[in-house]
Amino acid sequence: MRAVDKAYEAVRGGIIDGRFPPATRITEQEVAAAAGVSRTPAREALRRLHAEGLVEFTPNLGAVVSEWTDAEFDEIFDLRALLESHGVARAALRISDADVEALRALATQQLGEARERREGHLDRIADLNRRFHRRLQEAAGSPRLMRALAALLEAPLIMKTFLNYSPEDLQRSAAHHLELVQALAARDPEWAASVMRSHILAAKRTLGREPRRPRPG
C-alpha cells in the first residue's frame, strides 16, 4: 500500500470509528505518527479527505473533522436518493449472478441482526449496510459515481445514525435491501430505483424524528 493510501485509511478509519469526532483538529504530525509515514503523504491524505468532505481546512487550525447541520444532513440524504437510485438502476442492467447472491447474503444477515438484536448488533448492522451499498456501487460500474458518493455514504457512519433507529426501523431497512436484491435479480432498473429512493427517504424521515447527534457506544 502506498504511503498516502496508508495515511488516508488511518485517518478515515479514525473519523468513522469516533477516534476523531466532528470538530476535532487533526495535524499532519498526528497522521504521520498514526500511519507510520512522513508528513508529505500525511498532507496529501488530508487533502483527499477534504475533497471528499470529511475534513475542512480552517484558518489558524488547519485540518478539522467536518460537522453537519441538520439542513446539511438532510441534503446528504436527498443527494443519496438521487445518486443511489441512478446507481442501482445502472446496476440492474450490469450486475452478475455472483453479485446478486453476495448482496442477498448481506441483506439476509442484516435482517437476522435486526431481528435478534444481540449485543453489538448496531455495529454489525452498520458494517453490513456499508458493505451492501458499496457492493451496489461497484455493480453499477461507474467510477465517477463512486467518487461522488464516497463522502455521502460515510456521513451516516460518522453520525452513528443507526442509534436513532427503532427495532422496527432496523427491520424495515433490511427488508428494503432484500427487495432491492429481488429487483436486481429481475434485472428491473425502474423497480430497483424506486425501492432505493424509498429506502433512502425512509431513513431521512426516521432520522428527522429526533435530534441527530452521536451517542456513546
Image (tube, rainbow, N blue to C red):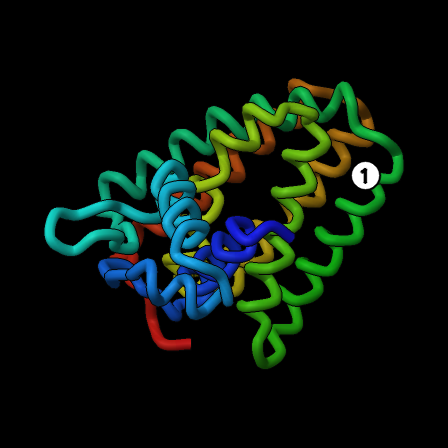
Please state which of residues 27 and 58 is positioned toward the viewer in this rendering: 27
- Residue 74, quarter of the rendered image: top left
**Residue drawn 71% across and 51% down?**
107
Whether residue 100 is visible to the viewer of this picture, yes or no, is: yes
Please state which of residues 152 and 189 is positioned toward the viewer in this rendering: 152
- Tell me if 87 is positioned left or right of 216 in this view: right
Residue 134: horizontal and vertical position, in percent?
63, 43
- Residue 164, quarter of the rendered image: bottom left
Vertical side of 22 occupied by 172: above or below: above
Vertical side of 190 occupied by 88: above or below: below
**Residue drawn 81% across and 26% down?**
186
**Residue drawn 64% across and 28% down?**
88
**Residue drawn 66% across and 47% down?**
132
Q: Amino acid at mark 1?
A: Asp
Residue 52: horizontal and vertical position, in percent?
40, 39
Residue 206: horizontal and vertical position, in percent?
39, 50
Please state which of residues 60 and 159 is positioned toward the viewer in this rendering: 60
The furthest residue to the left: 60
- Residue 187, quarter of the rendered image: top right
Vertical side of 92 occupied by 202: above or below: below
The image quadrant where one finds the C terminus is: bottom left
Residue underneath mark 1:
99
- Does dot 1 land on a helix, a strand or a loop? helix
Residue 73: horizontal and vertical position, in percent?
31, 43
